[in-house]
Amino acid sequence: MKLTNYTDYSLRVLIFLALKKDGELSTIQEIVDTYHISKNH
């Protein structure tokens, strides 16, 4: 299966947020730093 970059990034963000403890909030910068992707995506 081939995914677009946007789909790949979206799935990574969803997985990242799902692994957070009991609804703990995350910042865009935290996600960007974790996955080394552009803030604009």
Image: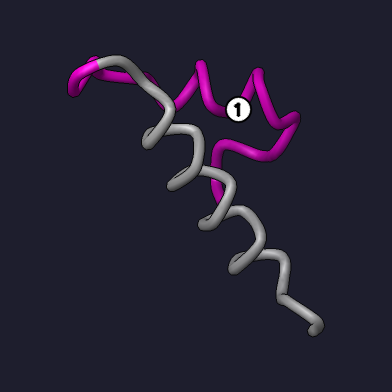
Residue 7 spot, x, y in % from top left = 59, 68
Which color scheme is applied?
Answer: one colour
Magenta-drawn stretch, dominant element (helix, strand or loop): loop
Q: Which quadrant of the figure has residue 20?
A: top left
Residue 37 spot, x, y in % from top left = 70, 38
Which amino acid is tagged 1? Val
**Does dot 1 land on a helix, a strand or a loop?**
helix
Residue at point 54% right, 56% down? 11
Quadrant for the N terminus in the image: bottom right
Tell which of 15 and 25 is nearer to you.
Answer: 15
Residue 24 is left or right of residue 5, and the answer is: left
Q: Is residue 37 magenta?
A: yes
Residue at point 72% right, 65% down? 5
Label 1 neighbour load within 10 Å: few <14, some 14-19, many 20+: some
Residue bearing mark 1: 32
Residue at point 71% right, 75% down? 4
Residue 39 spot, x, y in % from top left = 56, 36
Residue 27 is left or right of residue 16, and the answer is: left
Residue at point 58% right, 46% down? 12
Q: Is residue 12 magenta?
A: no
24 shown above or below 38: above
40 shown above or below 24: below
The magenta-colored residue range is 22-41
